[in-house]
Image (cartoon, helix red, strand yellow):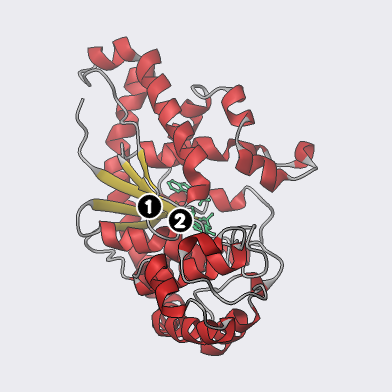
Amino acid sequence: MAFKELVFSGVQPTGNLHLGNYLGAIVKFVELQNSHDCIYCVVDMHAITQAHDPKQLVANIREVTAAFIACGIDPKKHIVFNQSQVAEHAELAWVFNCVARIGWLNRMTQFKEKAGKDRENASIGLYDYPVLMAADILVYRATHVPVGEDQKQHLELARDIAQKFNNDFAESITAHGFGDGFFPLPEPLIQGPATRVMSLRDGTKKMSKSDASDYSRINLSDDADAIAQKVRKAKTDPEPLPSELPGLDKRPEAANLVGIYAALSGATKEKVLSDFGGGQFSQFKASLVDLAVAKLGPIGAEMKKLSADHAYIDAVLRDGSDRARAIAAPNMKAVKEIVGFLN
Ligand code: AMP
Ligand code: TRP
């Protein structure tokens, strides 16, 4: 069965939105608006899978929404909303809990990383998180999902769940007039020069919201001084920059900074190296500061202004939630009929 192309993605409101989120995800969200209908979700239900402060969560939901808009997402043409306002996400997640297998979830590497050593003490929500993520996407029957590299495994799980649902209920799906499959197998869109932005303190670790050191990441809310300090202090090695790509092998910090420069400027890494190769890191870093401040400064300023305007942000989310629900509700009703619920 052919499905109408629809883009869905989500970002957690867990604070410290950073350059990795921007280059790995939000830049692609903005681009896809020109070619597709898009739904962008602030996934607040994912944000309570680990300990959180309720006051901070509300502020973070508004901040991620403000960041979407400041980066160029148009909430009138497309849909921007927060997950918890559309109950169908949780409803479909329950059905998917009964489709997904424990063995599948046991393989999820992000759970292992996040749960750490004390796995017995992790919340069930943290373990079940990829099932909710599958429901987020499939409750809209979305076909394309722009994400960073770290979400690849979760997308594969979403495809497995969609496929098993289609197989398990094949007869009922056909009987209810939905052809030979109710859910599309959603495709991850993991492309571009910065699908995995690394920490500024350790080129082998990904840049993350939860890193204890603020110097490990450039936040979208950082001002010019903070950006300049963080880039200047970013870890490097004593060698000058190479002129060609193979020279970045085994130099994760240098490779990361070159990748960031390339992604922010829209040039290839080859071009960046041909411009800066052979020179000192200090020179390259000074240019990177100028570039990062020019690109991110205006976004940070707009984001702060917008997130302070609660009336505006809350109205955007309410309107987006209404429009999201209008798509999700008939899909959920169909799922109920397919699995044999009376409604
Ligand atoms: P999260 O902060 O986990 O909600 O992630 C939101 C989006 O940003 C997802 O699509 C992630 O894959 C992406 N993302 C998060 N960290 C990075 C990173 N260091 N590099 C590239 N993409 C990232
Ligand atoms: N798990 C994603 C992350 O941590 C966020 C997310 C939740 C998501 N639901 C989604 C991303 C649906 C894409 C589609 O980054």
Mark 1 residue type:
Gln
With 329 as the anchor, is 248 left or right in this view? right
User: Where, by quadrant of the figure, is residue 203 drawn?
Assistant: bottom right
- Residue at (56%, 22%) from the top-left corner? 101
- Residue at (43%, 82%) from the top-left corner? 291
Q: Check contact, mark 2 vs mark 1: CB within 8 A.
A: yes
Structural crowding at the residue carrying mark 1, measured as other residues with C-alpha within 10 Å and reported as few (<14), some (14–19) or many (≥20): some
Up-down relation of residue 234 to residue 332 (above or below): below
Residue in front for this viewpoint, 222 or 12: 222
Kindly tell me whether residue 343 is visible in this rendering. Answer: no
User: Where, by quadrant of the figure, is residue 160 drawn?
Assistant: top left
Kindly tell me whether residue 316 is visible in this rendering. Answer: yes
- Residue at (42%, 66%) from the top-left corner? 269
Up-down relation of residue 26 to residue 108 (above or below): below
Residue in front for this viewpoint, 315 or 272: 272
Residue in front for this viewpoint, 332 or 130: 130
Check disc 1 and report its element: helix, strand or loop.
loop
Mark 2 residue type:
Thr
Q: Which residue is mark 2?
A: 195
Distance of label 2 from label 1 (alpha carbons): 6 Å
Structural crowding at the residue carrying mark 2, measured as other residues with C-alpha within 10 Å and reported as few (<14), some (14–19) or many (≥20): many
- Residue at (27%, 66%) from the top-left corner? 74
With 160 as the anchor, is 330 left or right in this view? left
Picture coordinates of residue 135, whole percent (x, y):
43, 37
Up-down relation of residue 125 to residue 240 (above or below): above
Picture coordinates of residue 326, whole percent (x, y):
27, 45
Picture coordinates of residue 67, whole percent (x, y):
42, 70
Q: Which residue is mark 1?
A: 191
